Amino acid sequence: MSPRRLWGLCLRQIYLYRRSLPRLLEIFYWPTMDLLLWGFVTLYLQRASAGGMPVFVSYFIGALILWDVLFRAEQGISVSFLEDMWSRNLINIFVSPVKVTEYIFALIVISALKVIAAFTVTSSLGWIFYSFDIFKLGAALLPLALNLVAMGWAIGIFTTALILRYGLEAEILAWALAFLFLPFSAVFYPVKVLPHALRAVSLFIPASHAFEGMRAVIRNGVFPARQIVFASGLNLLYLAISAWFFMRVYKKALVRGIIPKIGE
Amino acid sequence: MAVIEARGLGKSFERGIFALRAVNFSLSRGQILGILGPNGAGKTTLIHLLLGLIVPTEGEILVFGERLAPKTRGKILRRMNFASNYVSLPLSLTLRENLMVYAHMYEVPSPGSKCAEALRMFELYHLKDKQTKTLSSGQMMRLCLSKALINDPEILLLDEPTAGLDPEIARKTRQLLVKLSRQKGLSVVYTSHNLWEMQEVSDRVLFLRGGEVLLEGPGREVLGQYEAASLEELFFKIIEGKSAGPSRRGDKK
């Protein structure tokens, strides 16, 4: 990998976001709205139950902040790819000396920067409005967040491959695919709430282990080693599958002449 | 030595649609090859094959003596560049930012001064801090051409580069291409529907029709074969079927 080429690929996104207020707002606006709306709903429910759900607010605010980590990680990849399609710039990139692996790696770097920016805002708002300190998750925070980021990347790379294959018709997947996993990821409720059949599904979703781990730390203050190991193993598998799928689609795109079609 | 050599090049897409068939040609250093033909003749497909954006189903392409393949593509593309009337650059970036991005992607030494030089070449330097979305279509094409020269390529592939340019800028662009090919040995492959322009600039022409090469060779030689005074006359002779085919020396006798 060439650091200069990677820097060039990242630079275009940095210039883009530096200059575009709507794009910057898009990173912060929805997570802020979610946090405010659902945070206050949760506070209301807690008060209505006369303090019967003491850790409920922590579960919910923590879940909102960490779900956004996953969603931003996914969007950081798929929307950045779409930006190149929308600007009819994709061909210029694919006829430059940039390798496809460098391109994907640059999308991952951009995604990481977006996650850090959004996380800084949401965790600060959680503290300001609800006195919720996400850093109370302690040593577990980093591996839990990294696992959610990794799942976001796996979905993002998979989505990008589908967009490469089907063109702009598939662009809705950049926003929709992550939400397909939401009901089974035990984000806002524990896995045991799910019907038996769906519990089996959630076992194969790294995010469900990460969110169960988060609740375990808030509830007991215990490091969720088991959940982190499960989530990491699944993420490694899914990242490998999505990378393989992307390369397969890319090679087929070269045979079918798809890149010029979607890039012009 | 040929910088590009196509040997038996063919491309068919699914359902047996042939885009190109048995294309053979070579291009030497400093030569300009004009690809002409009616719509759907395979001109753009040929450019995409030469860029490795599409893989051929038959034959092979040698660039700088190396077979264009996934393993060699990156190394070869460092010495090439491309501009097309159908491809754009991010509109929210300024002209200078767009070129800086590509200067890094092509690992150009002293990117700042190289960007300024490329913008000056196409009379865009005074707009360097404007957002690309403020450009007219002709200015956008000039920016794409600036990008295409950012890495001092040895081979330049251009898909209808002067479409949308006003006559004055189009003339300057042609002059620049000829100057770069004569002085720096730049080899150019380009498509255009402007046959007068192609006749003025090209050292060689390749006439495609239905994905097959009808004619290939130095411009004058090709015109002579069809007893045409200009490429435009040649084009209509072929398209309208007014010519039975190339005249042979024997025929004239």
Image: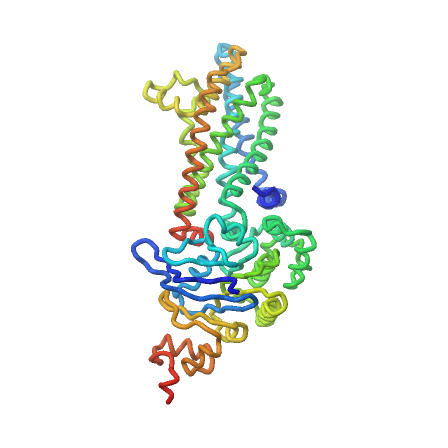
Q: Can you give x and y, in whole percent of width and height, for residue A78 in the image?
A: 48, 40
Q: Most extreme residue toward the left, as rendered?
A: B15
A239 up-or-down from B147: above or below: above
Q: Is residue A170 above or below residue B49?
A: above
For residue A121, say whether it is visible. Answer: yes
Note whether residue A13 is visible: no
Q: Quadrant of residue B250?
A: bottom left
Render colour scheme: rainbow
Give the image location of residue B74, x and y in percent.
52, 50
Q: Is residue B223 above or below residue A20?
A: below
What residue appears at the point 37 percent right and 57 percent down from the top-left corner? Answer: B58
* The image quarter in which residue B228 lies: bottom left
Residue closer to the observer: A85 or A23: A85
Residue B191 in the image, given as x and y percentages of width and height: 48, 66
How many marks are shown on the rendered structure?
0
Question: Which residue sits at x=50%, y=68%?
Answer: B33
Left or right: residue B81 compared with residue B49: right
Closest to the observer, B182 or A198 = B182
Q: Is residue B36 left or right of residue A127?
A: left
Q: Is residue B175 left or right of residue B66?
A: right
The x, y position of residue A237, in whole percent, is 43, 29
